[in-house]
Image (cartoon, rainbow, N blue to C red):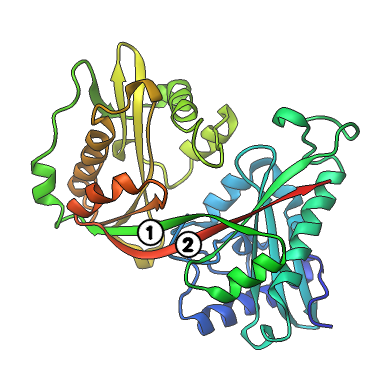
Amino acid sequence: MKGHFREYGERDLPALGGLFARADSHDGAARALAPEAADDLPLFAFAPRYPLGLERGLTREEVRSRLGSRLEEVGRLVLVAAEGAAADACVTVYPAGSEASWMLDWVVDPESREAMAIEGTVQAGVDRIRHLVSKGRRRVVDGGAASGTGGTPAVCCVEARGLREDVEIEAGLGRAGFKGDRTFVIMACELEKAHRALGAQKGVPEGIRLRNYRSEDAPAWIAAFNASFSDHWGGFSYSDESWARHATSPRFRKEISVVAETEGTFAGICHCAPSLNPREKGLAHLHILGVKPEFRRRGLGTCLMLEALGRLRDYGFERVELDMDSLNARALPLYEQLGFSEQEAITIYRRQIAV
């Protein structure tokens, strides 16, 4: 029966590979992380649903790094609706950000989409998250602190995403209890077009110097990131472990990661990452741009961004992309001045679940 989901097993790998290939061919856009039969785990199922937007250019190595200690249980994070050698759908869930935050993604065979309601597919993922949390794997109590297998029921936030213009996904997620929360606009710029704007770069605020990231900067970088985004939607933060995985991944390059330093402390950070997709040679992503609250409104964010764009051009990159939070409208004039234009918009939908 279409829509009957079960836990992934190794025998499902070829079927999942075929499912993703059919979906990509139908939708006209191949995912950045393509399936390979040689993989012993369905890591490609953790690639983003939309190749342009939020984590474009993700590689198999990066997925392994992101999953970290949860790699051994990746099978429990993937559900399949399959019979025989074919798969009708795949649902992926994985923890992200804080201990109470999960992400949910799904892919449905184009020929099965009319027979499989979006809300039923998404609910299978929600039920899996609830099951994992109820088993004490991600138990969270008031205040976001982890607890044991007993005590206060956990409250988790589940996040899904869809193209802003996709009314079918919006309606299906709405029926599944999700509400649109934010839209991220993916903007792109040809670095050569930004050349003149880079030449008119603002002066760095007095007492602050810009330099590239160094290996010994990890503690200060983590502190600066967590302080810069403590009041940001989603509340994402880095730990020593998660930052170590990120800083040793193939996408991290010190020479295009900039810090703003003053009197031994970091005032702001800007991190760019190259796309490792062979089809996207010359493309980089402006991945992180943050300024600590006490250093804001001095033009430091603009300085960090201009410095990063200049470094990207100097190191041979031709194009840069970034994700702009739709609520950060005041940044739009700067991006447009530098030559950025909208490519696509992705809406984030959220739902709270109690266990």
The residue closer to the viewer here, 237 or 278, is: 237
Q: Residue at x 50, y 28 (%)?
A: 226
The residue closer to the viewer here, 217 or 298, is: 298
Outermost residue toward the right in this view: 150
Quarter-of-image position of residue 342:
bottom left
Residue 308 horizontal/vertical position (percent):
25, 40
- Is residue 173 shown to the viewer in this render? yes
Query: Judging from the image, what secondary structure is the residue with disc 2 in?
Result: strand
Q: Which residue is mark 1?
A: 186
Quarter-of-image position of residue 171:
bottom right
Q: Which residue is mark 2?
A: 346
The residue closer to the viewer here, 73 or 77, is: 77
Compared with 142, 173 (above or below) is below
Give amino acid for label 1.
Ile
Outermost residue toward the bottom in this view: 111
Look at the numbered discs 2 and 1 and tell me whether their residues touch, using CB distance below 8 Å.
yes
Q: Which mark is residue 210?
A: none
